[in-house]
Structure formats: structure tokens, C-alpha cells
Image (tube, helix red, strand yellow):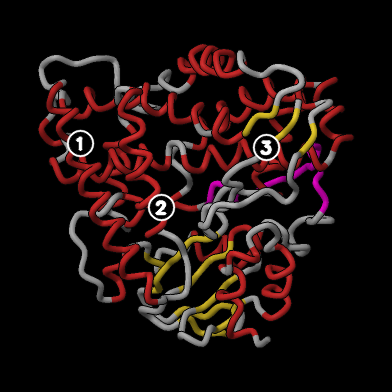
Amino acid sequence: MTADTLLERITDYASRPNPYPLYAELREAGPVVRQADGSYLVGTYHEIAALLHDPRMSADPRSRGETAGTLPFLRLDDPEHHRLRRLAMRPFGPPHSPGRVDAMRGEIARITEELMEGFEAGRQLDVVDDFAYPLPVTVICRLLGVPREDEPLFREWSDAIVASADVRPEDQASAERDRAGDQARSEMGQYLVNLAEQRRDNPGDDMLSAFVNEPDPALRLTHEELAETGVLLLIAGHETTVNLITNGVLTLLRHREHLDHLHKEPDLLPRAIEELLRYEPPVHMRERIPRADIDVSGTTLPEGTSVILALASGNRDPKRFQEPDRFDPARPDNEHLGFGSGIHLCYGAPLARIEAQAALDALIPRLGTARLVEDPPPYRQNAMLRGPRHLTVEL
């Protein structure tokens, strides 16, 4: 196999259970590897971090001539990115709403306890369907003000949108996935705008209410911006956290000594979650487009080309992390790329950390005698948002 086919091999479903040997191959061949289709792969930590902070690297697909309507701030560059992210942050976090996420701690603990009620010794359960999926979905529904009974609707939309957003070589199915994703995004956005409009002049204590009842006209989102922002928050608010929790459970069940240690010393859990974000991150890759020719370690990334930053590879770079393939919950100096870096650093990272801590804190005491029914488990199709589709354990 030549380096030209690395992206095809990394995104091949057969590689999903363990892409890390391919990431090692990428770093050996790199730090920058040109693909047969003219795109570039970057797999080393320092180069990825530098590019994530480089204002010449664009997240906007229009940078390579694509036509696009209203885009979520995740796909925009400054100053438009900064404007929309700031408006979205007003009802979510500091400085405008400093207590919003912290105030959710009790609610998250209560939702976690409710989900744990069915966990009885001697039965099998699917960590994804019975726990890791419903927890963040319930939390983001409460935050945005989406009725929980409508969750089946947006699960279907979410699956279509996430499938279309994957990083992969183009194939015949890509156009169909893109069409399905666009339609789902449109339907979900309209649903959220309609829901928000019901709260106009009749607000609840939720983010959709805050968006439509903003008193300052200069700080209001248009209908199109509200639709894109709502869709982004709803999907990003649960998709990555599902993977973080599920990958965490799988990793701890594969490393029983650390599971036992965390059971005895739960105060170590926050640091262990940072190591999980490095060792088995929920997001493996991000795409960027140079707005000018950029030199990276002697290789030119040409303006307008697709550049795939393999964050999960950077997290295993031996030039940055000592013994990177070892899971070490007490690892010092753990500045991982699990939530990205630069201006697009994950908006919901504080909430994801609280949810992961509540989830693992509740699960760890019950996992001591749990057995994995299938290892490796079946994985989701998506290579960019990598995590098990099911994780069946016997208590």
C-alpha cells in the first residue's frame, strides 16, 4: 500500500475498531502526506496545533469555491464566526450567562440516577442505547427547550446530518448522503425555528427562548442563523458526548487496574477524563482549507485544497506525549486535541466534561464485575466522530 491511500484506509470501516496503527504510519510518512485526490493529511501534534491557530486556514467550504447558504459558526471564519459564536454563547456561558452550565450539575446527576435504575446485576445492557445516548440528549433538550418526546424525530435527522459531515474520500454514495444531510438540516432547522417562535413573548428558562426574546436588535439571530445555530448545538451537544462516555467505558473495561483505582479514588476522575479525551477522543479529524499557500515542514499546502487534520493521530504523537499509546489517567501536562484548539475550540467542552464525569462516576462502581460481551464492539460508520454503535456489557 502506498501513502496515497492512507485516507481511504483510515476511513475504511474495517479500520474503525483500531485506526491507531494507520495514524502511526501517517506520522512516519509525514508530517504532511499528499493523497491521490490532491488532498493533504496532517498527523503530527505540533503541526496540527499550529494550523488550528493559523488565521490562513479556513473552516468555510466557500474558500474552495463551493456554493453554500447560511452556515453554522463551526464552518465560518472570523469575523463572522466570532459574531455568531458570541451570540450563541450569550444564553449558554460566561460572561452573559455564567451559571448556566454549572446550574445543570444537579439536573445531570438526577438524569444519571434515573438511567441507572434499570442496571441490575445479572442482566445485559447496551451502554450506548441504555445510558450514553439518552443522558446527553436529555441534557441538551432541557438546555435548548426541546420536548423530550420529539427526540425520535431529531435522532433520525441527526444521523443523516452526521453521515453527510464525515471526512472521507468522495464516492458515488457521497452525493446521496449530502442530499439527505441537507434535507435533514433544513427540516430540523425549521422545526427549531417554529419551536422558538412559540416562545416569543412567552419565554421559558431555555436557550431557544433566550434567542428569540433578546431585547437588543443588534444581538438577535436571523431565522436562518437561529436554524443553523440550533441544529449545530443540538447535534454537537450530544453526538460527541455519547462517544466520550462510551469510549471511556470501553477503555476502563480494557484497563481493569485503572477502573479499580478510580473506584477507590473518584477524585482522580477529572484528570482521567482528560486522558480519555487524548487516548480515545470522540472527534478524530477536522477539515480545513488554506486561503493562501502555507508551508508546513517543507511541504506546501496549496490555496483552496482540502487539508484533513487528524486530531486523534496528534494525540498519539510521541514527539508530544511520552508513551502515547499507554492509557495513563494520571498523565501530567495533558494538552490534548480532544476538543480541538484555536478559535474553534469546542463550545460545549465545559458541559461535556460535567456529563462525562457524572456518567463515569455513576458507572464505575457497577463496572467492577462487568464483562464485555463483544470486544471489539460494532462501531458507528462515521470515521470523524468515532465511537461504538453498541457496547453490550453483562453486569
Mark 2 — residue? 162
Query: How far from the left and from the top, in percent, is residue 227?
Result: 21, 42
Q: Where is residue 279 shown, x and y percent of the image?
A: 71, 49
- Label located before the other in sequence (2 or 3): 2
Q: Dot 1 corresponds to which residue? A: 191
Q: Quadrant of the C terminus?
A: top right
Amino acid type, label 1? Tyr
Lateral position of residue 273 relative to residue 183, left or right: right
- Residue 233 placement: quadrant: top left
Q: Which amino acid is tagged 2?
A: Val
Above or below: residue 286 compared with residue 392: below
Q: Earlier in the sequence, mark 3 or mark 1?
A: 1
- For mark 3, give the secondary structure: strand
Q: CA distance from mark 3 to mark 1?
A: 33 Å
Q: Give the amino acid at mark 3.
A: Thr
What SS does tag 1 mark? Answer: helix
Q: Count residues near mark 1 (Cα–Cα under 10 Å), then give few for <14, some for 14-19, many for 20+.
A: some
Q: Residue at x 54, y 60 (%)?
A: 383
Query: Residue drawn at (60%, 30%), measured in percent from left and top?
Result: 356
Q: What percent of the width, then of the height, locates residue 222?
A: 13, 41
* Of the pair 51 and 174, the residue shown nearer to us: 174
Residue 139 is left or right of residue 365, and the answer is: left
User: Which residues are the magenta region?
Assistant: 326-340
Q: CA distance from mark 1 to mark 2?
A: 18 Å
* Residue under label 3: 392
- Whole-percent x, y for residue 382 in the image: 51, 57
Residue depicted at 54% across the width and 46% down the height:
339
